[in-house]
Image (cartoon, rainbow, N blue to C red):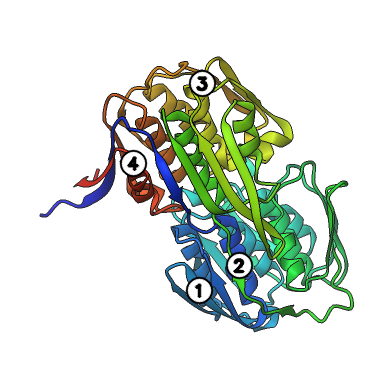
Amino acid sequence: MTPTLQEILRIGRSPALRGVCSVPGDKSISHRALLFGALCDGPVEIKGLGSGGDNSSTAGALRALGVSVKVAGSTARVVGVGFAGLREAAAALDCGNSGTTMRLFCGLLAGCPFESTLTGDPSLSRRPMGRVAKPLRMMGARIDGRTDPGRPDSLLPPLVIAGGNLHGIDYQLPIASAQIKSALVLAGLRASSRTAIQEPGLSRDHSERMLRFLGAPITVDPERRRIEVDPVGWNGRLAAAPVEVPGDLSSAAFLLVAAALVPGSDVTVEQVGLNPTRTGVLDVLRAMSTNIEVVQTAEVMGEPVGRVRVRWMGPLQATRIAGDLALRSIDEIPALAVACAVASGRSEFSDLGELRVKESDRIASIARELRRAGVEIEQTSDGFAVVGSDGLPPKGGRVLPDREHRIAMAGAVLGLLSNEETVVPSEDIATSFPTFGEILQALGGSVRRDVEPAG
């Protein structure tokens, strides 16, 4: 029998990274461009679409609901059918490894007058969905799922949703979550009365920006961290309009951190999203004494877009990440952990409990990979502390991302600093940034694509 092969990246100590590059379209905005495009009146042309597996899951689920979605590289054409044009799927909707797909579709399907089933891969099937189901049940939807034997109040996929006949609610989110907030906004647009959502922190606001641009009756009070959806008197229609997705700052973060750490580097990432609810990573890098230059060049559908340049200036300084800063850099924590791993001093991360229930327990995964590289790290219930090596090279070895794309890329960046070879499974990176290895190589990184027997 011929052995099954898997693609890997072999990474060695790198010379200076230099050049100008771009990154795939923002994953969060790409999900919403596809989904909201399906709810518009007529065709929606999308440029800059993210090419990772998570966005493919959203496209596939929409097709199963009767929406024409044609994707060619970074462009897509979605023929919107409006809320009323969605049709009951013939089988379960497969969300793959995408928690965003599952949670947003919970909100979408809560307002549809038919029954749907949402499923996913083994990793997604372990992720809790109770926090999104609770307010949707309060609005009138029926949502059933599995229960974790060790936690009788939990709710795990597959989820069965019977929607329709929703009413508005006034809801205080227990945590700041863009996914849960977006699900409630989608359900609120199909409710019979006003829905108000209060957040304890300011989570990313891509849904509000895009839906308001398309004509949805949404008002936002950022000072009070309050969103209101009032469909009373609204005709229920979203205007079809072209969508341009900016580059994903979460993907760019790994290139920016690499440039800050590899001696002599000078890297510019162009056409990247600069939404202020997402730029915590840039603020953290500034606090660590990174030489960073940020220039906004445009605004697209209410989303600021620009370029970010990072030049190596020597060892970085330790920092503390907590509160709103932690929320605004939640997806970039693995990249920032790498930056702190070779900085000077002890860095502390807290208010990151949400990372315990990502694709994996991301805090535990970060700790495992940093320890593999010889870095001293101590876990806490909602974060961790890292003692930086003050520029000393980390160890090489094999990265074990546990299907976590950001852990895989974090291990790859550490590998650029090691005197030993680092091996990274590239399949895991393809979830969000399939061209990561090629871009690193084009910037001058010591990266080589290879194959080896799987398992």
What amino acid is labelled 3 in the image? Ala
Q: How many marks?
A: 4
What amino acid is labelled 4 in the image? Gly
Marks 2,1: beta carbons within 8 A? yes
Tell me if mark 4 has few (under 14), some (14-19) or many (20+) residues whose alpha carbon lies within 10 angstroms of its own: some
Q: In this view, does 33 lie above or below 409?
A: below
Q: For the residue labelled by badge 4, is the local secondary structure a helix, a strand or a loop?
A: loop
Identify the residue position indicated by label 3 in the image.
343
The mark found on residue 76 in the picture is 1
Which residue is at the front of the view, 85 or 13? 13
Separation of residues labelled 4 and 2 (CA atoms): 33 Å
Q: Is residue 372 above or below residue 118?
A: above
Identify the residue position indicated by label 2 in the image.
33
Separation of residues labelled 2 and 1 (CA atoms): 10 Å
- Is residue 354 something one can see in this rendering? no
Image coords of residue 410 (percent x, y):
44, 36
What amino acid is labelled 2 in the image? Ala
Q: For the residue labelled by badge 2, is the local secondary structure a helix, a strand or a loop?
A: helix
